[in-house]
Amino acid sequence: MNVAAAAQAAGVAALSAPVSCLAWRDGAWAVAGLESGRLAVLRVPPSPGGTPVLEGEAEAHGRDVQSLRWSTPRRQLLSAGRDRLLKVWDFAEDEGGAAALRLVALLRLPGCGGDSPKLARTWVSAAWAPFLGGVVASLEGGDFVAWDAGGPDSDVVRLRSGHTRPVFLLAPRPGRAGDAPALASLSMDRQVRFLDGGSGAEEWAVGWAVPGLGAVAHCLAPSPFLPGTAVCGGGDGCLRVWRLEGGRPPAVLWRGLSGEQLRAVEWSPAEDGVLAYGTEMGAVGCVRMSCGRAGRLGRGHTRGPVHSLTWLFDGARLLSCGGDGRALLFEPAAEVPRGEPAELELAAKGAALCAQWAPEAQLLASGHACGAVLLSRLASGSAVAEAVARLSPHPPPAVAAAQCVL
């Protein structure tokens, strides 16, 4: 039985290859980038118990898709792949409610060819940057290019970033009215750098860099309260919090962290200056910027690392997924926060690898070792999640299938 037939029999949407990245357009539509280089358009039904519908797949890249970003407003999708191609797609719905992607612009970045062994270590990050004329993307050596996403290749402008290794993440500054444009980047060279903008792309220059990263930066999170403020954690066991304004060096938080590598970090959505962190050894804790000291939240995962952290219900609870396959619920605001965390019961019995809370929809998305992705509802005082929908990228192996029955 092929993938499509197996998926039809199981009543789930089937994708032709594993997912490498995903971008929500709104509550009804999402686009998945696949390891095969294809793009899959998915419609997520609003009703509980509904099944995501695969509208179709489009040939996009010759290798795995590494970056997907929607424009503002969300009418166009930017994709980047290991084949060093940037593509801009129009997203359109017809009168019957079906949707499709249509290619409108393409740019081939310079770099190694399709048969080069260096291609396996290539990473292309891309983002919309209207203040640079349209799109910004990373090159092999760590520099960037600015492209107007529709003009000839001769209009591409190269930007010196100061990085020496590939860039994994590009984040244009959200900014407030009157703020100067800026671009943040996270690289394999263990540095976070900021580019400050002038009146044109040619005038951009490295404005500031986070110094002293003693190891690879594994996680990065912007503050929901203070634009221009972000935190990163990495292999040296420290958290670094910096602000674009003022040019001050970052605040380095290490007290109470015990030197373990930091694998996940998230700002509290309810209280300014409160951070949650997860370590290589499975510990979960919180840091208050006001005192600068970390504290663990009771017993963490029995095997590390912590793969993901997400705050639930406006910061009342914290959910972590770790190397032991469990999803743990903590209550940082409780009078005795170091108690035993509750283990969240998800409808898939396979190990939970990651989870993300969507506050607008009050839904929890979780990814599992068997290949299933669940959408679940969770009551504020409960440790049992009610499955709303399930997506299987491909039929799991026979052994894993027995563990992933809803």
Image: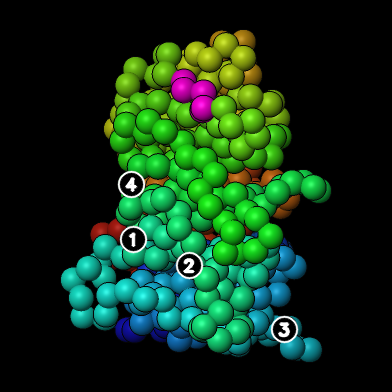
Q: Earlier in the sequence, mark 1 or mark 2?
A: 1
Q: Amino acid at mark 4?
A: Asp
Q: Amino acid at mark 2?
A: Arg
Q: Secondary structure at mark 1?
A: loop
Within the magenta stretch, is there residue 251?
yes
Find residue 69 and report its image quarter.
bottom right
CB under 8 Å between discs 3 and 4: no
State the extent of the magenta-drawn residues as a range: 249-253
Residue pictured at 57% horizontal, 37% vertical = 230
Dot 1 corresponds to which residue? 141
Question: Which one is in front in this view, the residue at disc 1 or the one at disc 2?
Answer: 2
Q: CA distance from mark 3 to mark 4?
A: 42 Å
Dot 2 corresponds to which residue? 158
Question: Which one is in front in this view, the residue at disc 4 or the one at disc 2?
Answer: 2
Q: Quadrant of the N terminus?
A: bottom left
Question: Which one is in front in this view, the residue at disc 3 or the one at disc 4?
Answer: 4
